[in-house]
Amino acid sequence: MNNIQVDLGDIKYPVLIGPNIIDKFCDNFESVGGKGEIYFIIDEVVFKKHFDSFTKIISKLDASVFCLPAGKANKTFASAMSIFADLNAKNISRDSTIIAVGGGVIGDLAGFISSCWYRGVRLIHFPTTLLSAVDSCLGGKTAINFRDTVNAIGTYHHPIAIFIDTNVLFGLPEREVSSGFGEIIKYSVLGASDITALLEDDNPLTVDTFGQIIGHSLITKEKFVKNDVMESEKRLCLNFGHTIGHAIEFSTIYNGEETLRHGEGVALGMVAISRICISLNFLSEEDLVRLLKLLKKFGLPTSFKASCIDMNREVLVRKIVDLAFKDKKRTSDSLRLVVAKGWGFPDIYPTNDRNLIEMGVKEVIL
Ligand code: GLY
């Protein structure tokens, strides 16, 4: 087991990382501060896949369970209302502990519910996607989508602990793991040299190195969130690749279905912003080559053909640029683009230059 103590300034909590954490959950539950009535909000696919382990935990802790599908379409008020109705029907008190088992959708939704129920109950995250394990479980952001706005409604509510089972994550489908590496490679560009060394190592990935990479990712995230939970400056840097990446991710939704996973969008966004950084003399061509090599090594895309979603390239580029300018990190004056002024040196670059963004987008949209 490879434990970390997260220290965000006023807020501190442990992260338990290792193989078979799932089987050690009950033994560690009380020591991390879990108590009261216990209520699981769990992704139905994860529940089925690890049915025996979770059934044992649930029965040992005498917990209630709310099972739901994890798709982005369920991160809504309607889902929250169903869970609030269930909490009410089961008379779950303010002295309870909610345990979120699933990826980012479940974590954000369960976090939102935990922050609202009786103005806040204890929350434990048990992320079951690599993306949520290296990013969304830490930092206290909770959210639901509203109409067409992603994460429009949310709060900050920190967990009392995070449990990460590296065997559960190592056994995920390849594309799921690759998507997680989008965020991990981002930490590398932001300057996490421990991660860069592990990613650039030619030895095959083992559960052990996987656990180390996850641990280093969370320690890196902690550095950017510490004393800036509300994202006034430093935390914004975690959005490297995200302004254009999100715009690509949402512009390529085809017949209501996502074409690109979040980490894949971030990968394309990082390539686009790196090209912009080269044009601003912040990055070198060698930095971009290094990034492309890492993205390819971990099965991530470095370009996307508009024809894959039956679209004209110019139309798709315009759609992406328009959406990038709606980025929620913008101020009333400008976009706050996260750039890298050299590998490991992120910074904020306010801009309204549409041509600059378009040039970056054209690097990846073919
Ligand atoms: N996912 C970026 C953040 O938590 O700030």
Image: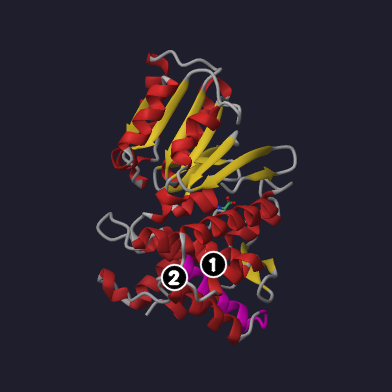
Whole-percent x, y for residue 98 in the image = 49, 28
Write the residue at 70% across / 37% down: 11
Characterize the magenta stretch by its predominant secondary structure.
helix
Residue 81 is tagged as none
Seen at 60% across and 70% down, the residue is: 196
**Residue 185 image label:** 1
Which residue has dot 2 on it?
Answer: 298
Q: Is residue 37 magenta?
A: no
Q: What x and y, as percent, mark residue 136?
A: 52, 48
CA gap, disc 2 and disc 1: 9 Å
- Is residue 223 positioned above or below 259 on the image? above
Identified by mark 1, the residue type is Ile
- Residue located 53% across and 62% down the image: 184
Q: Residues within 10 Å of mark 1 (few under 14, many from 20)?
A: many
x, y percentage for residue 355?
Answer: 54, 77
Q: Left or right of 296: which side holds 13?
A: right
Range of magenta residues:
266-282
Of callouts 2 and 1, the N-terminal one: 1
Tell how many labels. 2
Contact, CB < 8 Å: mark 2 with mark 1? yes
Q: Is residue 181 above or below residue 221?
A: below
- Front position in the image: 277 or 126: 126
Residue appearing at x 53%, y 34% in the figure = 124
- Callout 2 amino acid: Phe
